[in-house]
Amino acid sequence: GGSYPFRTAFQVLLSMNFKKAITRDFQ
């Protein structure tokens, strides 16, 4: 569908925030 690119961008944004939270947790 047309919402596929939006979903992909949302997943990338989510994973980026997840990595940030992990690195912040380790520090």
Image (tube, grey):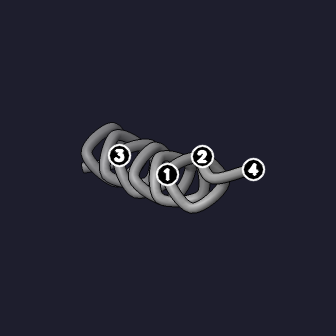
- Measured Cα–Cα span from mark 3 to mark 1: 16 Å
Residue with the mark numbered 1: 6
Residue with the mark numbered 3: 17
Looking at the image, residue 1 sits to the left or right of residue 14; the answer is right
Q: Looking at the image, is mark 3 or mark 1 nearer the viewer?
A: 1
The picture places residue 25, in percent across and down from the top left corner, at 33, 38
The reply to whether dot 1 and dot 2 touch (C-beta < 8 Å) is yes
Question: Tag 2 or tag 3, which sits nearer the N-term?
Answer: 2
Q: Amino acid at mark 2?
A: Ser
Residue with the mark numbered 2: 3
Q: Amino acid at mark 4?
A: Gly
Q: Looking at the image, is mark 1 or mark 4 nearer the viewer?
A: 4
Looking at the image, residue 13 sits to the left or right of residue 1; the answer is left
The disc label shown at residue 1, or none: 4
Other residues around mark 4 within 10 Å, as few (<14) / some (14–19) / many (≥20): few
- Measured Cα–Cα span from mark 3 to mark 4: 26 Å
Of 21 and 2, the residue lying toward us: 2
